[in-house]
Image (cartoon, grey):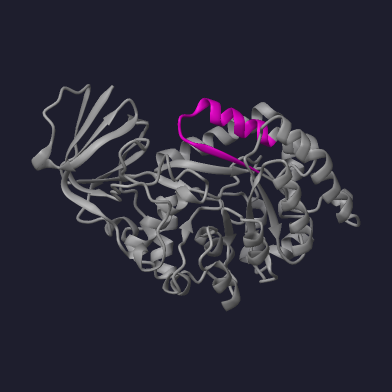
Amino acid sequence: MRTLFKNIKELLQIRDESIKFVLGKAMAELPTIKNAYLLVEDGIIKEFGSMDNCPKTEVNNLVDATGKMLLPTWCDSHTHLVYAGNRESEFVDKIKGLSYQEIANKGGGILNSAKTLQETPEDDLYQQSKTRLEEIMALGTGAVEIKSGYGLTLEAELKMLRVIKRLKQNYQLPIKATFLGAHAVPLEYKNDKAGYIQLLTETMLPQIAEAQLAEYIDVFCETGYFTVEDTERILKAGKQYGLIPKIHVNQFTSIGGVQIGIKYHALSVDHLEEMRDDDIQALKGTQTMPVALPGCSYFLSIPYTPARKMIDTGLPLALATDYNPGSSPSGNMNFVVSTACIKMKLTPEEAINAATINGAYAMGLEKEVGSITVDKKANLILTKPINSYGFMPYAFGANQIDTVFINGIAI
């Protein structure tokens, strides 16, 4: 199956060589070709270039992209989209001024979601999650990481991970699974956190590893949840079972989580709304990707990740949605890209790099997706006719996507 895109107004994020990620000043550079073509063969990018060199080859599908941009699909490296029900009942509490922590203290929050999920049959959970996955794909997401963490019992965590595995089997986009049993301490272990950590490390982890249900392990390293010492114990146990760390850090307080993530070679450290200078300096020169989640800051009215300072210091940055029922009930990466520009002062080039090539790296998919590179998957966004790619984050309330292609096939 061969598909030729021709007359592309501008082909974005072209990389002749597959680089892992971009950082610092390089984030402001977005390589493009104007008046371009792109050839896809059997779901893989075969070649691309100027229309002056467009091949006169026989193809199965011809897409005339006159006036339209073509770019890699968004790479959303941090979601919790497998969950049951929603938490709209807490929405008014937020409006009335209750904080995330105050809602959690009165029985809401993660524990609320966990109770609902534990009571939801696996098939129902799959159907709810499938709907959300199809929604974000239509919005341009072509690779996604999904976490467990709303189970908080052995049975419910396994149920979540089985649902993620089923999504991976039934959908063509790359999906990465993360075990986040250390999302919160369940009520039955309220006075025995050590006992819950023992359950995670000695009972849950062996079964998850044996069934090959996750590739990453995550911890909510935060005041009132899991300490740096707790986090180290859990990450160390996860690595013994072959799980790569990806951790929640610095959402509300800076307690040393960034440093413990770096010590254990975390692929990414995510949230980072509260960053001290020593946190930023610790990340310099590492292979750990900082990930910002502006949808969470928007919804909770908490500070945004100091992205401008981090990039200007020479760090890379990825953007993700944090799609979840409590603190970021949206999987719309277009909104994330816009918000990063509007509220975090990223340029459109920086935001697109953060949401594509750097997002791919943040879930170990940099060799498969995230850029227009020969031999990568043809997971592509074809925009509507627009003046420039800057119009996408500028027009934050409108959908500028014409068609999404996964493995070269329109969805």
- Give the camera-side residue of 157 and 98: 157
Foreground residue among 337 and 75: 75
In magenta, the rendered stretch is 160-178
Residue nearer the viewer, 342 or 275: 275
Residue 204 is left or right of residue 406, and the answer is right
Give the left or right position of residue 343, taking residue 56 as reference. Answer: right
Q: Is residue 169 above or below residue 245?
A: above
> Which residue, as the protein is rendered here, is positioned at the far bottom?
277
Residue 127 forms part of the magenta stretch: no
Q: Residue at x 67, y 51 (%)?
A: 218
Percent coordinates x, y for residue 402 in the rendering = 29, 41
Indicate the quadrant containing the C terminus: top left, top right, bottom left or bottom right: top left
Q: Is residue 92 visible?
A: no
Choose top left, top right, bottom left or bottom right for residue 102: bottom right
**Residue 174 or residue 125, whichever sits in front:** 174
Does residue 171 show up? yes
**Residue 351 place in picture, x, y as percent:** 38, 60
User: In the figure, is residue 55 to the left or right of 122?
Assistant: left
Residue at 30% across / 51% down in the picture?
Answer: 13
Q: Is residue 35 above or below residue 269?
A: above
Q: Residue at x 28, y 47 (%)?
A: 16
Residue 256, above or below 384: below
**Total of numbered circles in the picture?**
0
Give the residue displayed 88% in from the left and 51% down from the top.
Answer: 189
Residue 316: percent from left, percent from top: 45, 63
